Amino acid sequence: MTLMFAHSHRTFFILLFSLTVSSCFLIQNIKSGETLFQEKKFTVAADKLKSEFDVEPAQDVKARKAFLIGECYRFSNQTLEAERWYKTAQSLNYDAIATYDYALMLKANGKYDDAIEQFKEYIQQVPFNDDASKQLKSTQQALDWQKNPSAYVVKNVEALNSPAFDYAPVLYKDGAIIFTSDRGDAAGTQTYGWTGEKFSDLFYSLPDGNGSYKSSLPLSAVINSKYNEGAVCFNKDFSELFFTRCGTDNITNDYCKIFETTMNATGEWNTPQSLPLFEDSTNVSQPFLTADGKELYFSSDSREGYGGKDLFITRRQADGTWSEPENLGPNINTTGDEAFPYIANGKLYFASNGQPGMGGMDIFSATKTGKQWMNPVNLRAPINSAADDFGLILIPVPNERKKEVKETGLFTSTRPGGKGNDDIYSFELPRIKLYQLEVQVKEKVFANPSDPNSPVTGTVALQNAMVSLFDATQAGRLDSLNRYATDATGKFTLTISPEKIYKLTASKPNYFSKSENFSSLGFSSRDNDTIKESVTIVLDKIYKNVQITLSNIYYDYNKWNIRPDAALVLDTLVTLLNENPTVSVQLGSHTDSRGNDNFNMNLSQKRAQSCVDYLVAHGIAKERLSAKGYGETQL
């Protein structure tokens, strides 16, 4: 009887366990893909949505599912798959947001030319969208950064990386590196629905004495748990630790919080306590403690922000508590996400996908003016890429390399070519002795030299053009430095300083003046090296009393409002007039032959006036402008 009872009990337990597993499996399958998406189980949701997509007959529903699949892949950082599914949603005539997200993924995959076309398409669909206009301009800028990278040298730190997610390195005592990873040694046993991988933990690795690192080991079990841990920082003597933990046993309170712990007399970490910075329904993460231990910077999706995630600061009070968090303001934060703050050498480094960048998250540096962080500068390629780049830190340059290297550090990137998903990379900034800039001024050559509306056949060097050099490093201020004249080849060469932003304005009688900016940020002096860069400025000849056609100024029938595509053309005219303050222009407008003469004359006058109004709204004095409607009289 006893044996039978034990056997029956065991059989019953196995059956019950099997039923429980089957029940969970059935519940998971009963849930719709959109429900799983709302629960942020993106890997499971993508599979479910794809199976629903395959059998869905209604095009509008099918388009919605394609868009959500794209969202799942975007959130799980599978940008190629996201690109594919956003394109599918767009082809099924989903909302315009599919075009915008498709453009973002093209940009994130380094397909800048295609991304530019899609951003233009979105601007046609959604006029006057500031985010899209900024993305368009930054994608055009990214093309230039890709062709003209800075002097940083970037390498994958293979000893720290694995096929898993490895990110957010921090310098620990004795040169050790602590970082976040969801590799197999992580403590948790559950799968994170967002990534489809294990929950992450903190790991550390000691230097091996040969410029690399030893095998990585998990940090203290007091800190690592069955939940997600990551993004750590320390005080100056490494006796106080702050880190991020996401997840609790309470499914309704599954948010990220910052935890703090101190080291006790035995060298062990005390039980971590969460910081009450915001209400429980707010994510708070990625802490950075200043060297004096008085200020804590972090990222949060608080409703007090400007968009997705913003950077905040809280200050330690005399009683050890923390002040009410303050937003760093619109100079740093955007409608996108800002994350991974880090301060060194008087600069705030952070990652953003809202500031003008090369793709996903880019790394920026900002300087402090008074009490405000200002003027974020993109670190450009090769530190930034079309992928996500974030979590930059500086590490001391070894004494034996200080003559050759100005700066070293680590950061995280999802760029292709790594060992896994997120990988940790190192960077070095060599010392540069001379920074030479060759400037060339050219003019356009027209098929008909007397007709500026004829096709442009090329450019030729412009001799005796004057180029004024300004220091534009400090926002809102231009300091005149020097003037140069071009030689018979239209060129001159000058030596410029590192860590500067320059404005070069070229001018010549009977030509429109034009300016170009050049940045030497990220360079320094070295005894045995020279960097040479070049800038070309193409001037337009002034044709007095000659009509010049502005291309692509189109209007909808019986309309005179400025369309987004027309605004891009008028913006170039704003720049030209700002750089040539003595120039006055008449803007003329024509119509086609639809409508009677009076109708067309009135309509063309309204269209010409709308262009004038646009220029005035962008700072051009109305006394310099006049509007003339020609109707269909000059077809």
Image: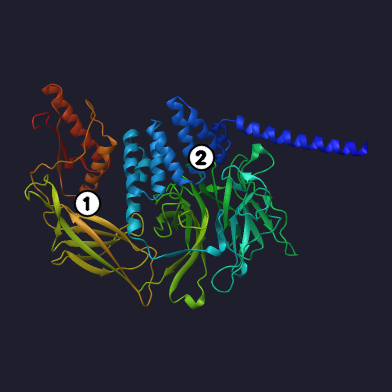
Give the image location of residue 512, x and y in percent. Answer: 16, 52
User: Which is nearer the eye, 541 or 221?
Assistant: 221
User: Toward the viewer: 456 or 67?
Assistant: 67
**Distance of label 2 from label 1 (alpha carbons):** 46 Å
Mark 2 — residue?
A: 72
Horizontal side of 303 relative to 377 (left or right) equals right
The residue shown at (19%, 51%) is 580
Query: Label 2 amino acid?
Result: Cys
The x and y percentages for residue 454 are 11, 45
Secondary structure at badge 2 equals helix
**2 and 1 marks in contact (CB < 8 Å):** no
Above or below residue 479? Residue 64 is above
Residue 334 in view here? no
Outermost right residue: 1
Residue drawn at 52 percent across, 64 percent down: 157
Q: Badge 2: how crowded within 10 Å, few (<14), some, or many (20+)?
A: many
The way the protein has been coloured in the rendering is rainbow
**Residue at 77% from the left image edge and 37% from the top image edge:** 14
Residue placed at 58% from the left, 68% from the top? 213
Q: Quadrant of the C terminus?
A: top left
Q: What residue is disc 1 on? A: 579
List x then y, in percent, for residue 445. 12, 53
